Amino acid sequence: MRPEEDRVDIDRILSLPLETGSQEKAAGQSLPSVGRGDLMTYDAAQNNPGRFADLVRRKLNRSLVASLEACVHCGLCADSCHYALARPDDPRMVPAYKADQVRRMYKRIVGWTGRLVPGLVHAKRPASDEDLNRLKNVVFGTCSACRRCTMNCPMGVENAAIVRFARGILADLGIVPEGVFNVSRDQWESGNQMGVSEQDYLETIDWVKEELQAETGDPSIDLPVDVEGCDFMYTINPREVKFDPRSLANAAKIFKLAGESWTLPRWGWDQTNFGLFSGDDRLGGFVARNAYEAAERLKAKRIVISECGHGYRSTRWEGYNWAGYDQKLPTESVVVTIQRYIREGRITVDPSRNPDPVTFHDSCNIARSGDLIAQPRWVLRRVCSDFREMHPNGRENYCCTGGSGLLSMAEYRPLRLEVARIKAEQLKATGAKVLCTMCHNCIDGLNDVVKHYRLDMKVVQVMDLVAGALVAPE
Ligand code: SF4
Ligand code: SF4
């Protein structure tokens, strides 16, 4: 394990300046998303503290108010947060402290006590863009919005929802980390988080198909695109196109053996949704609507979501509300689809083909926010011969440390890796050689942890292990 040498100066993190190079470039290029007012850019000439106050009033809802009002400052949430556990001597890492940076502004802007006697209730509105920039560093840099603290809060305070609320308002003012701006820009402009063009998407699919046909000797194996009337439309994470086409190949192989009728859409294939992370509900609605409309256009009976934590949460649970969309089609994770295949005998698996000890990391967005806990374990126990739990797990699991878009925010990486000590200790205690997760974002977050803390583990997804255990029919 790495020693204390990596301890980060939190004052420096909280005073990191607002970088606007990408925003200026986007405005100079007259990007359509900027022109339409979808992608907001920073304007120092505006009264940003005043705009912040207006947005607080406009965007508040009943559940946020409940969380903003309910905290009794008992401090119990400190024991839940990997930031606070890794830096127990630093009160700024306690979840309630982070939420309080928003709460004090809310109280001064909205609360009656905060307006009457602000000093008495620690109410303070942002007075300058520097104050807003500091808030940016708190809500983007010191919280992965994993929601673990809510599990242990006696008052049910949703600190992560407060963090997302503040992120969304700051996004409306262009006061965001460069990485957040860049990924949001790509998703607005191209419909997917990684700016993959339609041509690259279709060429990658063709290439995967050719490789698979050569590998299996089966010319009928296919990755169909835009086929109408299939049993399901398959949505993916752009990382699968850009960096990990192996997971697309695994899916195609499994679906073929199961005799499935499926299709990828030409447009609306990105299930990831940066709006969940940036707090921008408009972006969230745009991305979710693309997928829902594609499935309707293709007359698919279901939407199946590949292994992706925030894609699952966004597409299955949150996207309808952001998009204001009356989505009637059932949606499910591909791990549930695979569970059905095994249960119904549509595919045969042999656990002895994955003999190394395997442990499972629950994605926060899938387990804690999506309630999908038993299903991946059911599958893993049938495709691996030595499955062992890490502790805690399920809803209580620790974040991979890369949640809430933190992987795109390079400036906060040193702190992320420092507090990843909690995750690293948890992983090491399992003695597993294979670390499985069902989320592309967690794959990258966990690979960083494994590398930084020099753990002897390989990070894989459920489908990698299923594909490795497949028994071809005689
Ligand atoms: S556990 Fe809940 S009530 Fe207690 S300090 Fe934390 S957020 Fe506030
Ligand atoms: S949501 Fe997660 S990272 Fe954020 S304060 Fe709560 S426990 Fe910590």
Image (cartoon, grey):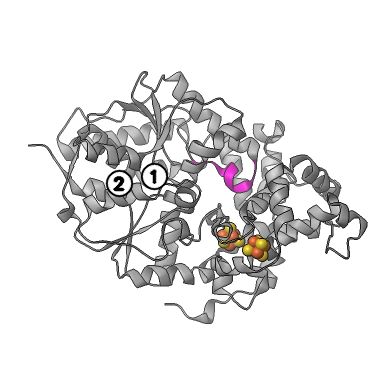
Residue type at mark 2? Met
Q: Residues within 10 Å of mark 1 (few under 14, many from 20)?
A: many
Image coords of residue 95 (percent x, y): 63, 63
| Quadrant assignment, res 339 | top left
Residue type at mark 1? Glu
Q: Which mark is residue 119?
A: none
Could you tell me how many numbered marks the image carries? 2
Q: Which mark is residue 307?
A: 1
Asked whether residue 275 is drawn in magenta, I would say: yes
Residue range corresponding to the magenta coloring: 272-280
Residue corresponding to mark 2? 463
Residue at 45% in and 26% down: 329
- Helix, strand or loop under label 1: loop
- Which is more N-terminal, label 1 or label 2? 1
* Residue 464 to residue 286: above or below: below
Asked whether residue 474 is drawn in magenta, I would say: no
- Helix, strand or loop under label 2: helix
Residue 5 seen from this side: yes
